[in-house]
């Protein structure tokens, strides 16, 4: 079965081609069927391969399938090849699975949109690229996927391109991502210079055999450059600005691309390069700090947003920060685990928001919602479950993964008490703003506009069924990684061990694992920590989350006047947060305007003055010279004859003089 | 049998030089195109004289050969040149070279 891994990305590619070329001629039904069945088959293949992989002993769970030679140029070689290992198959499962449900949801959500075939074409292309990204067996193919998903993200953010704001948001996302990709590709170049290959197995294998292959400076440079790429794609400080704007796209797109899958590519990439990162403690520290800072910073912005999708967007950035915190402290499997659970509940939250919009004829402002609990019960309950999950309420998926990261942030050898503290506070803040969104949308008094209120209706089955499935996954998704402390087995951690190191039983682990990652195992993840402390930390983080929920309840259900009062009192602070700390404006001044000035300067100074000046100057010079010289051309034959004779005389004189003197 | 007095080659060449110079001066100074043309013929014939002289004194037929070529070219040139003058006269009613200055920018 493993040999058929290429089928996973192939199906969406076929769907893309069919819908791209013929979609407009087919009816909407056919287009929807083609797109969804492509994803369904892809998901099915992923499941089959997953079970095949599970059936093998852990040491045989890494498999490479080379499709064909792609680039053969001198000493450089690259193939189109896919790698099946626990990490990539888990990602493929998440991507194809969540995509599948979101495709089905989209059939209902986008039903009346004139761009229906175009939408599914882009969506299939996106899944194809994303699967390339996660299944690639070398950096170059990964980069193709990386850029491909960026392109699809651009196309889908600007899907309603007739709206200026959507077109601009697409452009912004594209440009900000370019900044990150610049770092990413430089990192790839550095890797190639040092290894002469871009193959994952070759690079990581040779590093594991000989950890001193690279100088620590080089490794740090490579990992930081790669992290810059991850910052762009996964919207971390300072490149997070594009993600909130990306909400201009259709809501299922926000759900799929800008919450569940694409934005997690950076986390996946760092987990994939765990061997490299393990060798660069400075980079790890930077990753952890950036992740932690992003988590709390964007959570605070989430406090004051009134647009339901913007709240979710900032929440996504914040949760991505958690994942980076996880991988940054060396808990790669915890990061990937959170990535997985986050894909479920954040995908669900966005789809729920889409369902709310559907019910309210496209309304996004939470101040114009309220009391929707009874009117759209399925949406409410699924949204409620996802909110509980993201808030870290015990028993749901988000609790397990978030707690794992929090614990690792504290206990791992790369961790620190302050990292834990900040992340725990951010967890409380997450609970607060998520319940704020929930309460504002579904509880309290109805603030819905009169004429909209008549049309409130629950979404059709095709939209609610994916909601329910994702809700189930949001609940049970965490039970594959229950920590040992609570009597679980942490299957995720064990399953990923062949790739990410730190297996529960090192003897069983993949043969290629070096001493290095085993050192990780002992010092980092399963290092001698006291169970009491872990339990205490867990209780504390739960209490913090409950406090967050409590405050939200107090503010938005019990006493809805309170937030306004508080905003009045702390007016300056409220304005600061409401305006997202004026970061967009700051970037506008710092980067956009200075670049514009640079551009204008180069245009006027260099292009117009130097280049045009040189070209026109040369022409002018010759024009002037010829205006002088052409006076010699009188048109009188005798003048010409005279100059000929003068020339002849000079020649004769020259030869005579030469004959005399030499 | 009469005795041809031996005239030294220098004299031939001097004559040729004098003729050539007269031709040059005429060609540069005269206004009438026909006269200029005649002066050019004079220059050509001065050159022919040099060719023939040197051919004789160097005991080589090369010079004579060249003289024939020059004569042939001069004849052709005369035909073309005179035809041009006729045309110029028809259009401009003059063959005064000072008034014919269209050969320029």
Image (tube, helix red, strand yellow):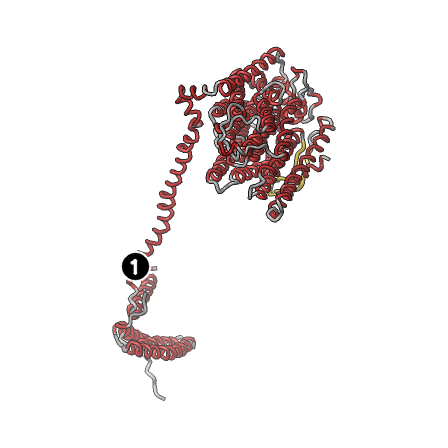
In the depicted structure, whether residue A73 falls above or below residue B21: above
In this view, the residue in front, A605 or B89, is A605
Placement of the C terminus of chain A among the 4 image quadrants:
bottom left
Q: Which residue is mark 1?
A: A627
In the depicted structure, whether residue B85 falls above or below residue A259: below
Residue A620: horizontal and vertical position, in percent? 33, 54
Quick check: A57 left or right of A370?
A: right
Which residue appears farthest toward the bottom when viewing the image?
A: B1
Count of picture labels: 1
In the depicted structure, whether residue A120 falls above or below residue B16: above
Residue A70: horizontal and vertical position, in percent? 63, 42
> Quick one: label 1, few (<14), some, or many (20+) residues within 10 Å?
few
- Which residue is depicted at the point 71% across and 33% down? A48
Quadrant location of residue A316? Answer: top right
Quadrant location of residue A375? Answer: top right
Residue A378: horizontal and vertical position, in percent? 61, 28
Element at label 1: helix
Residue A322 seen in the current view: yes
């Amino acid at each position: 079965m493993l040999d058929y891994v290429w089928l996973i990305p192939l199906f969406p590619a076929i769907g893309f081609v069919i819908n791209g070329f013929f979609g407009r001629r087919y009816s909407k039904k056919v287009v929807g069927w083609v797109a969804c069945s492509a994803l369904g088959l892809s998901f099915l293949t992923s499941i089959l391969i997953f079970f095949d992989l599970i059936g093998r002993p852990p040491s045989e769970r890494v498999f490479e399938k080379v499709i064909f030679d792609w680039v053969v140029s001198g000493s450089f070689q690259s193939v189109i090849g896919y790698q099946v290992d626990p990490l990539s198959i888990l990602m493929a499962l998440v991507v194809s699975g969540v995509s599948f449900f979101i495709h089905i949801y989209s059939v209902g959500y986008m039903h009346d949109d004139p761009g229906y075939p175009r939408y599914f074409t882009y969506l299939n292309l996106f899944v194809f690229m994303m699967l390339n990204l996660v299944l690639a067996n070398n950096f170059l193919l990964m980069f193709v996927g990386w850029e491909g998903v960026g392109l699809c993200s651009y196309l889908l953010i600007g899907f309603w391109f007739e709206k200026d704001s959507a077109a601009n948001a697409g452009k912004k996302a594209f440009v900000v991502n370019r900044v990150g990709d610049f770092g990413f590709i430089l990192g790839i170049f550095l890797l190639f210079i040092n290894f002469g290959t871009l193959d994952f197995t070759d690079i990581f294998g040779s590093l594991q055999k000989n950890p001193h292959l690279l100088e620590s400076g080089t490794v740090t440079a490579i990992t930081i450059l790669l992290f810059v790429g991850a910052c762009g794609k996964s919207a971390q400080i300072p490149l997070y600005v594009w993600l909130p704007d990306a909400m201009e796209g259709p809501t299922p797109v926000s759900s799929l691309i800008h919450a569940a899958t694409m934005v997690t590519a950076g986390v996946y990439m760092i987990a994939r390069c765990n061997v490299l990162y393990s060798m660069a403690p400075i980079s790890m520290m930077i990753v952890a700090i950036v992740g932690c800072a992003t988590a709390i910073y964007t959570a605070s912005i989430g406090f004051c947003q009134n647009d339901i999708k913007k709240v979710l967007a900032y929440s996504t950035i914040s949760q991505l920060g958690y994942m980076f915190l996880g991988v940054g402290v060396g808990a790669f499997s915890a990061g990937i685990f959170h990535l997985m659970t986050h894909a479920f509940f954040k995908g669900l939250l966005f789809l729920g928001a889409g369902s709310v919009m559907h019910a309210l004829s496209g309304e996004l402002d939470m101040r114009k919602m309220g009391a929707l609990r009874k009117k759209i019960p399925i949406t409410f309950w699924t949204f409620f479950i996802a909110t509980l999950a993201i808030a870290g309420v015990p028993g749901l998926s988000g609790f397990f993964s978030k707690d794992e990261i929090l614990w690792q942030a504290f206990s791992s050898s790369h961790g620190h008490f302050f990292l834990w503290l900040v992340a725990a506070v951010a967890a409380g803040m997450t609970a607060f703003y998520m319940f704020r969104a929930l309460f504002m949308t579904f509880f309290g008094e109805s603030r819905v506009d009169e004429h909209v209120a008549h049309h409130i209706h629950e979404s059709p089955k095709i939209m609610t069924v994916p909601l329910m499935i994702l809700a189930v996954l949001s609940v049970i998704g965490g039970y594959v990684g229950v920590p040992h402390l609570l009597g679980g087995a942490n299957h995720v951690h064990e399953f990923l061990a062949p790739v990410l190191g730190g297996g529960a039983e090192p003897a069983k682990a993949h043969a290629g694992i070096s001493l290095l990652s085993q050192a990780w195992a002992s010092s980092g993840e399963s290092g001698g920590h006291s169970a009491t402390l872990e339990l205490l930390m867990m209780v504390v983080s739960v209490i913090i989350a409950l406090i967050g929920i409590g405050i939200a309840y107090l503010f938005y259900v019990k006493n809805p006047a309170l937030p306004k009062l508080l905003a009045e009192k702390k007016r300056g602070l409220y304005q600061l947060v409401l305006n997202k700390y004026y970061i967009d404006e700051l970037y506008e001044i710092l980067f956009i305007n200075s670049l514009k000035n640079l551009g204008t300067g180069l245009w006027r100074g260099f292009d117009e003055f130097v280049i045009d000046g040189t070209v026109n100057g040369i022409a002018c010079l010759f024009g002037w010279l010829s205006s002088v010289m052409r006076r010699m051309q009188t048109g009188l034959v005798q003048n010409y004859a005279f100059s000929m004779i003068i020339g002849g005389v000079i020649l004769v004189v020259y030869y005579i003089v030469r004959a005399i003197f030499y | 049998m009469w005795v041809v007095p031996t005239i030294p080659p220098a004299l031939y060449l001097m004559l040729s030089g004098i003729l050539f110079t007269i031709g040059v001066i005429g060609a540069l100074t005269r206004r009438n195109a026909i006269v200029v043309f005649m002066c050019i013929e004079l220059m050509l014939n001065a050159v022919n004289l040099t060719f023939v002289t040197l051919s004789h004194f160097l005991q080589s037929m090369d010079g004579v050969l060249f003289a024939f070529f020059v004569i042939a070219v001069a004849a052709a040139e005369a035909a073309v040149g005179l035809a041009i003058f006729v045309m110029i006269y028809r259009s401009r009613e003059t063959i005064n070279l000072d008034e014919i200055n269209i050969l320029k920018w």
